[in-house]
Amino acid sequence: MDFCRRRTFVRLERSSSFGQKYPRNIRLAFGRVLESFQRGVERVKSLKTKQISTRSVGDRPKKESGRTWEVFDPQDQFLQTWNKLFVLSCVISVAVDPLFFYIPVMEKNGDTCLDLDKRLAIIACVIRSAIDAFYAIHILIRFNTAIFLPASRGFGRGGLIEDRMAIAKRYLFTHFIIDILSILPLPQVVVFAIAPNLKTEVSLVIKEILKFVIFSQYVPRLWRIYPLYVEVTRTSGILTETAWAAAAYNLFLYMLASHVVGAFWYLFAIEQWDACWQERCKNQGQDDCRKYFYCDIDGYINRSTSLGNLSLPCPFIKPDDIENLTVFNFGIFTDVLRSGVVESRAFLKKFSYCFWWGLRNLSSLGQNLSTSTYVWEIAFAVFIAIFGLVLFSLLIGNMQKYLQSTTVKVEEMRVRRTDAEQWMSQRMLPDNLRERVRRYEQYKWQETRGVEEEKLIRNLPKDLRKDIKRHLCLDLLMGVPMFKNMDQQLWDPLVDRLKPVLYTDKSYIVREGDPVDEMLFIIRGNLATTTTNGGRTGFFNSADLNAGDFCGEELLTWALDPQTSAPKFPISTRTVQAKTEVEAFALMAEDLKTVASQSRKLRSKELQQIFRFYSLQWRTWAACFIQSAWRRHCKRKLEMALRDSEYGQQVALANEAGTSVNLGATIYASRFAANALRTLKRKRAAARPTRAPQRVLQLLPQKPTDPDFTA
């Protein structure tokens, strides 16, 4: 086998065409590359199928001793991030390669001749080498990335192939060849290896080789971007998470295409100038025209001192202004030649002008291009028109998606308002009801922006939904002392049953006498709660509820009573009205009863005082009871004061009338009258013993029912 390789190498070295055109060291370099490639092919052919180790998706790979690299899971977050970065690096590499087209420059050295911008060549090679190193790391990662079992795809994402030999074999026969062709440092070899060893026609040879190398590597580089994009989209969902990012990504591709087209335009312009000089030289009857146009050729001759008419430059006349057919038609390259950028080594100047030309013609689909009859020039103009049309369509399409994504909710709101207006007109609702409907829809839009919060949370996984509900609602539930003392394992079921609700200002949440079917926990806003004790004359009690408060505590008594059922909801003893716009969470009656029936601690006796202390019903009843007791106390105190005053007057009269003749008769008469009044009062009290307490009780609200706290 070594003999065959040696014979092949000798034949390559002794080839007449190859040996005459390039020096011996270049031939040796190409021979080594071919020999290494042949050895690699032989190793691929010698691969044998080994036992394949598999594991299910999601299992962590086991690290093996003595190995630096572990087998990556395709679903791993690191690998997904790396693939996104690699796609971006591939796009950047496509932008770096056209920089080599700016290396040829028309140098003014007495006469204009073709030369190379060595400084730009070094910078472009350094950037290209950095990107190739990034590409090499990706190849190593691909050799250590597990692959899915083909048989398991029909049943979901099953096992993964972790055997390194199987992974390598799969990669070598799929994308390895394309990746190797993309990573080959051919431009660097041309600039750092071939160019210094050439002794003649350096600028011409380097220009032609670079053009061939960049063209040949552009195909695998562009070919590799789309499968990578598909892989990233498949593993991580989407490459650009938002419509804005997708639009920006397509805009970047549009700018990149403008840069590439501008670089090709610059290179083709220099070739057209070279073609013009070659044509004029041949028309002058010169045999070897190369020595007049390339600055670095051996025996370069200044045209201004050796030739007559040839020393005059090719006129840069626009195609529409050409009247003499003997004048060389530069076609679409006239502008860049007349601007003088091909004669300048200022890269920023050349890049900006060519980039602007590419962007302008891609945007206008090449409508302003006036071509010559040169076939390749016409093909280049056709490519610009078609490529510009495709890119412009993609850009406009993604921009439209972005605009639609930002306005779709607004459009849905507008349609909903239109439907509501039509329905209200059809039902002939009065103006006040229409205004309330409009105000509610407007408030709901301001708070939610068209997002159905309950539907969004319901579609999430159970653990994530539980954590979100805990974050939003648990503090509110802990504001209810009854729920503070319940079992912690029941917090999650209780929190999971809370539903967001909105109320506009002056809207009634519940009226006195209506059944209570929900318990409300206030997040934001103010409410007023009032009671008239069933509409009794002269009775009125009010209180304010703010963020963190709750109402509808009648449901707690109802939920703890095993005899109650859904149709028999408790009756509200208060009227609750929103004073401002209110945002709250609602706990429905059946949900509360379900959770309460599962909590032993919630039914403990010690919670009775807590329930009474924080209940508005019990607070109102207690306040009225205290007021009634205070009134009775004041009345009894007043009666005692009157009785003491009457007794004092009697004693004073007795002292003053001691010397009177009728003193005994007066005292007797006074005592008789007092006893008569006292007897009359006793008889009246005996005849109606319960009238006063009944009258007092009639002024009190109904005493709330104690919940059943028995275990």
Image (cartoon, grey):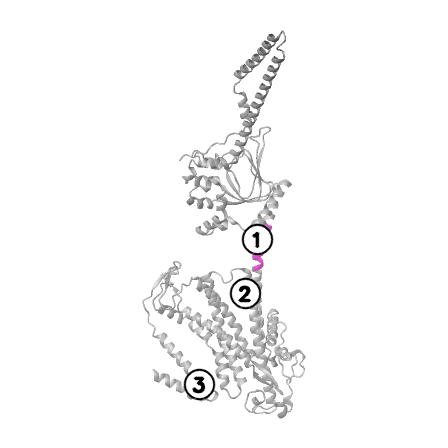
In percent of width and height, residue 542 lies at: 58, 35
Mark closer to the chain start, 1 or 2: 2
**Residue range corresponding to the magenta coloring:** 402-415
Q: Which residue is mark 1?
A: 409
**Quadrant for the N terminus in the image:** bottom left
- Spatial CA span between label 1 and label 2: 24 Å
Residue 565 visible within the image: no
Q: Nearer the viewer, residue 508 or 538?
A: 538
Q: Which residue is mark 2?
A: 249
The secondary structure type at the circle numbered 3 is: helix
Q: Which residue is mark 3?
A: 27
Count of all numbered marks drawn on residues in the image:
3
Number of other residues with Cα within 10 Å of mark 2, as a class: few under 14, some 14 to 19, many 20 or more: some
Residue, far left: 51
Residue type indicated by callout 1:
Lys
Verify whether residue 411 appears in magenta: yes
Mark nearer the viewer, 1 or 3: 3
Going by the image, does 76 lie left or right of 697?
Answer: left
Q: State the residue at coordinates (40%, 78%).
A: 37
Residue type indicated by callout 3:
Arg
In percent of width and height, residue 658 lies at: 61, 10
Mark closer to the chain start, 3 or 2: 3
Verify whether residue 28 appears in magenta: no
Residue type indicated by callout 2:
Tyr
